[in-house]
Image (cartoon, rainbow, N blue to C red):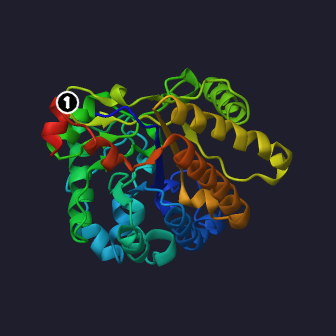
Amino acid sequence: MSSEKGTFVISLDFELYWGVRDKKGINDYRENILGVWEAVPAILNLLEKYSVHATWATVGILFAKDKQQALSFSPLKKPSYTDKNLSPYSYLEESDFLEDKMHFAPTLINSISKCAGQEVATHTYSHYYCLESGQSGEEFKEDISSAINIASQYNIVTKSLIFPRNQFNENYLNLLSDLGITSYRGTEKSWIYKANHNKESKKRSRRAARLLDSYINLSGHNTYKIEKINEKQLPVNIRSSRFLRPYNKKLKLLEPFRLQRIKKGMKHAAKNNEIYHLWFHPHNFGVNLSENIEFLESILKYYSELYHRYDMQSLNMKELCEKSEGNSYGKKAS
């Protein structure tokens, strides 16, 4: 793989209500979810304007046009979480009415797939949690198979995966390889980004550290050489560098620090021929859309500067994986 260029990667976790269903009532997050219908076209317009490629990891149920189709593609073996609330299937099966814009998005997916440089990837079929007790590898594999099958109805070949809630499970990687998944997004190496089941006090301390890390450099730039993803087998880990936090009016005065934190990491990657991987959710832009879009445009403008100054490239996860040449997984992926 050529290491002559820095690489800017963007990935989005596209979920609608399925991403928060186990934590929030449907009306508690309604404004954010409905705002996605304005946010996605606005984000796509910016990506196209600045020729930036991105990976949209999409919950499989969003491909369905309605409840019946969502159920028809559901796996036979559903996740047997110890905490039954984590599974969306009772909610899906028992709801008399599922509001389309909160639960299904085939038209948005179609818009994404038609936009140059955009990859439609998977965020599992049911927003599956790979580290929760009770569920199994076999159930996970069936879930991913369902996601691949429903995406194929749109002539989409699924190559990349993002684990919901970043619950990366190393034991499941071989299962992904068997299904043709060539890359996934891992977390930053710092302890503050590790997804696990520590005590609530430790979770709170990690959340506080992550918030602070968005404004000042606690964990480093979290960039890495392209060669670092050259593992011996698929799928490869295209680790994240930074979560793009949404605009917060209470922290408005800190916005310049948030932007500089991202720009410095991008510049470091561009100058040192490394990868900078930015990620967020479309529903993060569902409120305060104009402020969030303005912030994202500042980032993309800066990428354009780095492109002209350092020849930085923009690739989605699938493209980055396919850039590999002359090594074992590059041959396997072709």
The location of residue 92, given as percent across then percent down, is 39, 66
- Quadrant of res 296: bottom right
The location of residue 333, given as percent across then percent down, is 17, 43
Q: How many marks?
A: 1
As rendered, which of 33 and 295 lies closer to the eye? 295
Q: Mark 1: which secondary structure?
A: loop
Q: Amino acid at mark 1?
A: Gln
Residue 277 visible within the image: yes
As rendered, which of 118 and 311 lies closer to the eye? 311
Mark 1 residue crowding within 10 angstroms, few (<14) / some (14–19) / many (20+): some
The location of residue 125, given as percent across then percent down, is 32, 56
162 over 212 or under it: above or below: below
- Quadrant of res 3: top left
27 over 180 or under it: above or below: below
Q: Is residue 123 left or right of residue 308?
A: left
- Quadrant of res 60: bottom left
187 over 114 or under it: above or below: above
Residue 99 visible within the image: no
**Residue to which mark 1 is pinned:** 233
Q: At x 36% / y 72%, what residue is drawn?
A: 114
As rendered, which of 100 and 157 lies closer to the eye? 157
* Residue farthest along the front direction in this orientation: 309
Q: Is residue 146 left or right of residue 262?
A: left
Q: Is residue 230 left or right of residue 32?
A: left
Q: At x 41% / y 74%, what residue is drawn?
A: 111
The location of residue 4, given as percent across then percent down, is 39, 34
Q: At x 28% / y 33%, what residue is drawn?
A: 1
